Image (cartoon, rainbow, N blue to C red):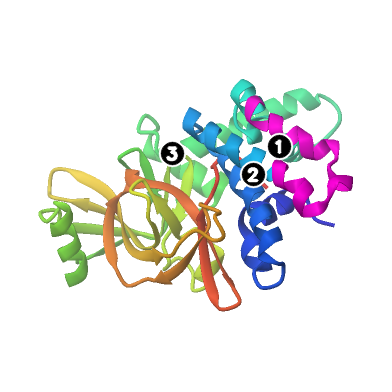
């Protein structure tokens, strides 16, 4: 039995490419309308233009439903899809009033209780302590001695290697190295040719988004090294770096850019990868979101994650 989050992922990311050449295109294109609309209504930022596109898409889905599946299947749960856009206008993205995040957080909160007595106090205290500890690596007001004590006695992993640049937290093993010839060319092309001091990290956290380089693990298909940028292209993160010109610092990522094809059966967020030769450099704040990449039969597909708020 699938969980709700697994059904969501099937609808948004896996369903359409998995059913190509299995389900007739007539049905698959119809399913794709629902995938496209729900993706738009579960994003972090939803504009009026987005709502109008989602509304047209859902109405097309509902209008075609009887033609595709017959009038006997035109049930109430099909009709209520036409009200989803107004719900989002009134209350925000679908994830904001979905029960799944609340149920997930209830599970997390329950783990903070060790006995029935004083359950509320236990939850509040342990949640606040966890939040405090999580904020310590980048807090310049906390002394190095306190950070070291927490590192050794509570966390058990290295916090002293965390570096904050451009409101991003860089961590993992730090390596001082020279830029490669390709990286030097990319920096010059991006206007950062004088930033020749380089420190490489394996992980970075920016705006709550955690990203890792492809060097973090050998099995790069199973972690978040794939990104979608504010310039609307997909890439894999080759390395995460802090650069310095001796006075100023910038955080950034060296990338291998994915050339992509047309949207799959009209599902705009889901595209096939056709090439991956081009290299690029982006400042860290130009990373918009992580992406999900998967191989189905002989083709690789990629899509941006719909938001950063839902947890499974």
Determine whether the residue tagged by mark 3 lies in a helix, strand or loop: loop
- Identify the residue at horizontal 56%, vertical 41% (top origin): 40
**First in residue order: circle 1 vs circle 3:** 1
Report the magenta stretch's main SS: helix
* Left or right relative to 245: residue 130: right
**First in residue order: circle 2 vs circle 1:** 1
> Horizontal and vertical percent for residue 135?
48, 35
Determine whether the residue tagged by mark 2 lies in a helix, strand or loop: loop
> Disc 2 vs disc 1: Cβ atoms closer than 8 Å?
yes
> Horizontal and vertical percent for residue 165?
30, 42
- Residue 284 belongs to the span the image colors magenta: no
Q: In 3D space, how far apart are the residues under numbered discs 3 and 2 (Cα atoms)?
A: 16 Å
| Residue furthest out toward the left | 194
| Residue furthest out toward the bottom | 298
Residues in magenta, as a range = 62-86
Disc sitting over residue 207 in the figure: 3
> Horizontal and vertical percent for residue 144?
38, 39
- Identify the residue at horizontal 57%, vertical 44% (top origin): 154
**What residue did someone put label 2 on?**
311
- Identify the residue at horizontal 54%, vertical 52% (top origin): 156
Mark 1 crowdedness (10 Å alpha carbons): few <14, some 14-19, many ≥20: few
Mark in the foreground, 2 or 1 = 2
């Amino acid at each position: 039995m699938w969980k709700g989050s697994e059904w969501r992922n099937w609808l948004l990311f896996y369903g359409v490419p998995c059913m190509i050449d299995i389900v007739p295109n007539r049905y698959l294109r119809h399913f794709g309308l629902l995938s496209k609309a729900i993706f738009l209504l579960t994003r972090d930022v939803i504009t009026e233009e987005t709502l109008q596109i989602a509304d047209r898409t859902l109405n097309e889905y509902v209008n075609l439903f009887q033609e595709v599946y017959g009038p006997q299947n035109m049930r109430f749960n099909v009709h209520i899809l036409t009200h989803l856009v107004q719900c989002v206008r009134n209350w925000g993205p679908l994830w904001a009033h979905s029960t799944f995040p609340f149920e997930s957080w209830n599970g997390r909160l329950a783990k903070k209780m060790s006995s029935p007595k004083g359950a509320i106090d236990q939850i509040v205290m342990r949640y606040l302590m966890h939040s405090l500890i999580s904020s310590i690596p980048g807090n310049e007001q906390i002394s190095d001695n306190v950070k070291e004590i927490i590192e050794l006695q509570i966390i058990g992993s290295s916090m002293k290697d965390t570096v904050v640049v451009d409101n991003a937290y860089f961590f993992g093993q730090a390596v001082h190295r020279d830029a490669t010839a390709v990286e030097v060319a990319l920096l010059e092309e991006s206007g950062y040719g004088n930033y020749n001091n380089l420190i490489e990290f394996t992980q970075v956290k920016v705006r709550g988004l955690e990203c890792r380089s492809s060097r973090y693990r050998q099995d790069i298909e199973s972690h978040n090294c794939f990104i979608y940028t504010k310039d609307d292209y997909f890439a894999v993160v080759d390395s995460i770096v802090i650069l310095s010109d001796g006075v100023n610092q910038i955080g950034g990522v060296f990338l291998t850019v994915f050339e992509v094809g047309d949207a799959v059966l009209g599902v705009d967020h889901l595209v096939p990868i056709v090439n991956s030769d081009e290299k690029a450099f982006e400042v860290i704040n130009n990373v918009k979101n992580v992406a999900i990449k998967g191989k189905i039969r002989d083709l690789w597909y990629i899509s941006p994650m719909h938001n950063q708020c839902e947890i499974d």
